[in-house]
Image (cartoon, helix red, strand yellow):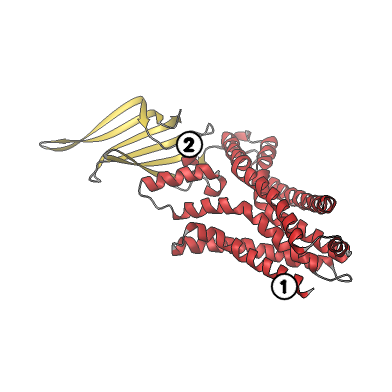
């Protein structure tokens, strides 16, 4: 069994590595050509070397997105080739039963699950964040739309609406506006700051601060304006939360996204979209298991004189349909307020059931 496992694992790993490198090279070429249009901008500070470094930092994100589909293509190719050359038939006569074949492939799929999780939760967010900061250092600040990012926070009997217009090349928020409300929901103050330094997870050090505060007096309310160079503002809003609000949530790590969801929930904000993204990040690595299960039935097909490319192409279409359905369920779950875990897990469960059904039917037929 060790010899059989070593044979199958070796063939699949080589095929998956080849397919993955081919896709990454293609994505790298397109990204680099697209990034060349920014070379020379911002007074010529953004050079070809910066574009090359930025595109290199995009590779972990592409690898995270591509791994399940490359696992499917590589595994289908190996299973179909073994079936075409009758090698899989010989393996079956040597004791490789259906249950053992499924268990061996699931073991290999589990290794791909761990690799996908490590890349998506640690390497990819780090490289994405560093790449954005690298690009902003030479092209300008990271901004979103016309109004920037909005966050809310409650502190005792006060609530705050925080607007961050952009992120500086150092990763600090800039163009800050903090709207302060009392427990009745009435506006009491507005604090503006040019930039905020996030020294820790408990406070921001605001720079170039302008504060407008409403003072209630017997004769009526008056507006008082203060100016100061520095002001310490106590808050639990972290740089990761700002990154989630300014950047795409799928680019964040699972733990950072979880903390952001808790922050939104504690401040009475909608969390449906981010909860679906959180569960998608939890279940996405498991799609590698779905892919190897989807590929296994190809080993039980008989096509000695057939074209292996057509079967691989059919498997690829099945894999693409899985990812399309995954995105469709995310949007439908957000619109119809489905349970977030169900919207994220349903496509994988459906395709796993279909794959196991096809696998069982082929085994019983033979």
Compared to residue 88, the image places residue 14 above or below, namely above
Q: Quadrant of residue 294?
A: bottom right
Residue drawn at point x = 36 percent, y = 27 percent: 232
Residue extending furthest front? Answer: 95
Residue at 49% over, 39% down = 240
Residue 253 in the image: x percent, y percent? Answer: 55, 43
How far apart are labels 2 and 1 at the CA level? 52 Å
Classify residue 24 as left or right of residue 88.
left
Residue at image x 62%, y 39%? 127
Q: Which mark is residue 42?
A: none
Helix, strand or loop at mark 2: helix
Q: Nearer the viewer, residue 259 or 65?
A: 259
The numbered mark, 2 or 1, whose residue comes first in the sequence reads 2
Circle 1 Cα neighbour tier, 10 Å, few/some/many (<14 / 14–19 / ≥20): few
In the rendered structure, the answer to whether residue 342 lies left or right of residue 40 reads left
Depth check: give the residue in front, 139 or 98. Answer: 98
Q: Residue furthest bottom?
A: 365
Image coordinates for residue 264, horizontal then vertical, percent: 40, 47
Question: Residue 233's x, y, as percent?
Answer: 36, 31
Report which residue position mark 2 lands on: 239
Mark nearest the camera among 2 and 1 is 1
172 vs 191, left or right, is right
Q: Is residue 34 visible?
A: no
Q: Nearer the viewer, residue 189 or 159?
A: 159
Quadrant containing the C terminus in the rendered view: bottom right
Residue at image mark 1: 361
């Amino acid at each position: 069994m060790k010899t059989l496992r070593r044979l199958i694992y070796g063939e699949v790993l080589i095929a998956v590595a080849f397919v993955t490198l081919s896709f990454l090279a293609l994505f790298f070429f397109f990204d680099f050509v697209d990034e060349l249009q920014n070379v020379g901008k911002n007074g010529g500070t953004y050079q070809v070397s910066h574009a090359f470094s930025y595109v290199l930092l995009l590779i972990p994100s592409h690898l995270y997105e591509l791994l399940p589909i490359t696992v499917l293509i590589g595994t289908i190719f190996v299973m179909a080739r073994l079936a075409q050359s009758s090698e899989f038939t010989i393996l079956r006569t040597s004791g490789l039963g259906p249950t053992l074949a499924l268990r061996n492939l699931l073991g290999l799929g589990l290794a791909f699950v761990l690799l996908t999780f490590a890349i998506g939760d640690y390497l990819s967010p780090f490289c994405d964040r560093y790449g954005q900061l690298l690009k902003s250092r030479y092209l300008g600040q990271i901004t979103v739309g016309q109004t920037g990012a909005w966050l809310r926070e409650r502190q005792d009997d006060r609530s705050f609406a925080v607007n961050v217009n952009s992120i500086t090349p150092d990763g600090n928020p800039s163009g800050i506006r903090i709207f302060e409300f009392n427990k009745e929901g009435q506006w009491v103050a507005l604090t503006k700051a040019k930039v905020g330094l996030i020294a820790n997870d408990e406070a921001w050090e605001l720079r170039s601060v302008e504060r407008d505060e409403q003072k209630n007096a017997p004769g009526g309310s008056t507006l008082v304006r203060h100016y100061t160079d520095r002001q310490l503002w106590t808050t639990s809003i972290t740089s990761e939360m700002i990154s989630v609000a300014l950047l795409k949530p799928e680019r964040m790590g699972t733990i950072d996204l979880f903390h952001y969801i808790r922050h939104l929930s504690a401040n009475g904000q909608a969390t449906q979209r981010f909860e679906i993204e959180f569960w998608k990040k939890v279940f996405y690595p498991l799609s590698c298991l779905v892919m190897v299960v989807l590929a296994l039935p190809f080993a039980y097909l008989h096509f000695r004189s057939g074209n292996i490319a057509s079967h691989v192409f059919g498997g690829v279409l099945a894999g693409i349909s899985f990812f399309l359905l995954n995105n469709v369920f995310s949007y439908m779950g957000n619109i119809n307020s489905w349970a977030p875990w169900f919207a994220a897990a349903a496509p994988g469960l459906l395709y796993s059931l279909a794959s196991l059904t096809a696998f069982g039917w082929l085994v019983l037929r033979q």
